[in-house]
Image (spheres, rainbow, N blue to C red):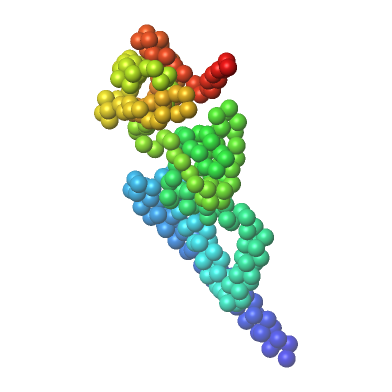
Amino acid sequence: MTQGLDNIKSLTGNLAVDTVLSGLLTLVVCFIAIRIVKAVVAKALGKASKLDVPVKNLITKAVTIILWAVTIIIVAGAFGINATSLVALLSVVGLALSMSVQGLLGNFFSGIMLLINKPFKEGDFIEAGDKVGVVKNIGFFNTTINTLDNISTVVPNSDLTGATVKNYSREPLRRVDMSFCTSYDVPTEQAKEAILDAIGKDSRILSDPAPFVRLGAYKGSVVEYIVRVWCKNADYWDVHFDLNENVRESFAAKGVAMSYEHVNVHVIDK
């Protein structure tokens, strides 16, 4: 009787050791497989020149998480743990976590969309909703924008994907739209000549597309001229402010009276 019990214990011990050894061996094989797969993915991503670095990092992390999740299930099975129950448990835990971090997940997937669609990149000057500034960093959960007065602002990615984004840096050229008003006494050609003279003084203003200067509207007490010129994107604000100053000087030199909206009151004596 005693000998029989000893034989059962011995068999059980051998089975337990075999299970542990099998599990450890499976873990080692899975670990090697993970390293091989990650190396293959890294090599493939290295050849994908069209993908940005943040997108490559995201793909690498996603592959790593998936591989380890599969490894846990395989190794658990090798140790004799019911894989079906483990998968169900992981699903419940995953659902609970997703519900508790819903906002974070929304920002995370919004970050993925920003990295894939590329409405802007780091260094671009953008306007998104009430946020205007230079993009300093695009993260998985939020984006950092430096405003015009150099305040670092962290914006949730979901706010950016839900807003209309104007990217002022994407195109190499940009049009400067302005208007100038003169008195009704100034002939049209004289006013246009003065404005074109001011435009010609700035070498940053492009000749192609050609500058546009036309009489735009007859207003209450002024004549408005519409001016549209093109320049390199980086020169936009310098051209804008310098053109304002140059037109004023040109008007003065050519005897063009600048005017503003006003009301003339005539008193008639009876």
Q: Position of residue 205 (x, y in %)?
A: 33, 23
124 sits to left or right of 73: left
Would you identify the image quadrant in which residue 91 lies? bottom right
Find the residue positioned furthest to the bottom. Answer: 1
Find the residue positioned furthest to the right. Answer: 2
- Does residue 103 appear anywhere in the picture? yes
Find the residue positioned furthest to the top. Answer: 253
At x 48% / y 37%, what residue is drawn? Answer: 126
| In the rendered image, the vertical position of residue 248 relative to residue 122, given as above or below | above
At x 57% / y 40%, what residue is drawn? Answer: 130
Q: Nearer the viewer, residue 16 or 45?
A: 45
| In the rendered image, the vertical position of residue 214 relative to residue 162, given as above or below | above
Q: Nearer the viewer, residue 17 or 40?
A: 40
203 sits to left or right of 95: left
At x 38% / y 50%, what residue is drawn? Answer: 45
- Does residue 80 appear anywhere in the picture? no
Q: Quadrant of the C terminus?
A: top right
Q: Nearer the viewer, residue 52 or 185?
A: 185
Would you identify the image quadrant in which residue 36 lies? bottom left
Q: Quadrant of the N terminus?
A: bottom right
At x 36% / y 36%, what residue is drawn? Answer: 171
30 sits to left or right of 45: right
